[in-house]
Amino acid sequence: MPFRTEPMTVNIGPQHPSTHGVFRLRVTFDGEVITEVEPVFGYLHRGTEKLAEERNYVQVVTLTDRLDYVSSMTNNQAYCIAVEKLLGVTPPLRAKYLRTLVAELQRIASHLIGVGFFLQELGTFGGTPLMYCFRSRERILDLFEMLCGARITVSYLRPGGVFSDAPADFWPALDAFMQVFPGELAELEQLVLENEILMVRTRGVSPLPLDVAVNCSVSGPVLRASGLAWDWRKEDPYDAYDQVRFEVPVGTNGDNYDRLWVRMQEVHQSLSIVRQCVAQIEPGPVRLDLPLVLRAEAGVEAYGRIESPRGELGFYLVSDGGISPYRCKIRSPSLLNLTVTEHLLVGWKLADMIVSLGSVDINMGEVDR
Amino acid sequence: MYGLQMVRGLLVTLKNLRRKPFTVQYPEERLPQHPRFRGEEFVWYEERCTGCASCAKYCPLGIIKIVTSPSGAALPQGEKYKLEVFDIDISRCMFCGLCVEACPYDALFMGSGFEQSRYSRLGLVIPVKQLREAEKRPSTWFRPQLEGTAYNPHQGQPLDWKQVGRESWRWHQREKAGMRLAPDSEGDEKSPQPPFAKGGLDGSSTGGAP
């Protein structure tokens, strides 16, 4: 008869330094081994969908900033694309390029946060790699401040374009960033991806089989790490993604290392997209001449989706002819990526628990909405 | 087994010993802010304001309170309303700047500071008196007419109401002269500048052309 210890249930969170935001995990251990996981969320629920029904179409842009607060630009983008589909308008070409550019910068910033906190959860002493990531992210946030006056809650995009063109000094600053950042990225990669200790901790840990990932509607880097090249930027190009060339990095095993590796490779692809946008962008209008208070026809429905840094982010809007959406449903990638928590954690040890959770890179603002 | 990696790790440490810190010691050292920064000290020009309350209607949170009354002074253009209350409750403000976007007369601007702290929530309501007397250093957010000039909210003189309006903006002057649709005869389109150096003025104006 094998030796079994008394199962023990431990609550991690909702206020815990190692959870991503206000999130609670009820975990049952048999000794060191996890036997049962129950994620409990909803602590950060702010009712964004309901609030959106009381505000007009442009005002909702400010609410979407607060969904996934480490990638506000892509939230704006998804919402604006949904409203544009609802109204049946297309933004001008320069606006499309600017949107692509800021979305890719935001993807870099968001993946840096994802990678940095993943390493933090591996127990890197004093957060050194995290600070490497924050150093580069700081430069991107500076660029955002130059563009739209805010660093996190940007509200830069508007239905029908972007609110204003980039100031003249933005382009030299972007150039300077593109000069400095590849060096910093190489330094980070050398520190991280070639690290023997990191490989031992992450290779083969918590693999996510592709069929489970697909069945659970997982999207984004987590799905691609499991071996499926599925990216909405390729499958259904929005904004200027049909004008730029990039590759979709794909992992093989779907373990923690692959998820980290896919994010690092995506940063390289994003850099290449930013370069192409700067080369291709042409002067022109950046915003359609739409009224401040928009009205869509009654009974029209639209679903706008993008590939956010965490996966497929979609906004489903229904109009009743009024100045605000009748219904606004948000399909948030973090929530659906959380559904595989059990597959990731059960059978693994306590020390891998937070690491595997961190490798999914969830954002509680988006999970609870 | 990890010996080589340890040495490599320590080499990184050695390399960083010679580097300057990337962080700044905030209260003593300050990073430059960009002119578009959406800050707290709202700038309001009473001379330009008509009391239309567009800003109050457009605020997603409804934190601007405006009360007007007919002033009684019969101006040739019509009656001007007198503003009795113009309060901005910045304790609930999220600095999205939509009020500035909604203002049709360039009367309201975002501020450039971020260091408002008070002991009570009431202290965070900016009353009309404080808005009148404050030093006017508007942010250039959503005000392209300020961006074309070399104005920087963190240096130089505060601006008075005559300097901030759209009427001094060359696109606006062309628009007034009925030249809105005509392409720029100065050859702006063929200028040898890089394509992105043209800035926001061109885009937003031609975007308005029917």
Image (cartoon, rainbow, N blue to C red):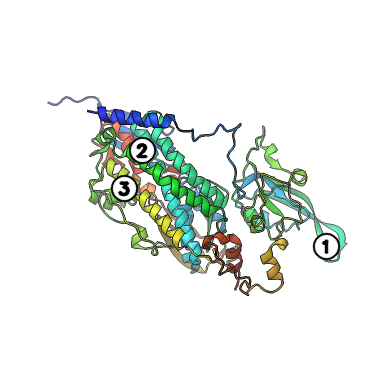
**Cα separation between marks 1 and 2:** 63 Å
Q: Which mark is residue A262?
A: 3
Q: Is residue A332 left or right of residue A47?
A: left
Marks 1, 2: nearer the viewer: 2
Task: Identify the residue under disc 2.
Answer: A118
Q: Position of residue A336 (x, y in %)?
A: 35, 49
Task: Name the amino acid type tagged 3.
Answer: Val
Label 1 marks which chain's residue? B
Task: Name the amino acid type tagged 2.
Answer: Phe
Q: Is residue B163 left or right of residue A94?
A: right
Q: Which mark is residue A18?
A: none
Q: Which mark is residue B79?
A: 1
Q: Nearer the viewer, residue A209 or B113?
A: B113
**Cα separation between marks 2 and 3:** 13 Å
Q: Position of residue A327 (x, y in %)?
A: 48, 58
Q: Is residue B133 visible?
A: yes
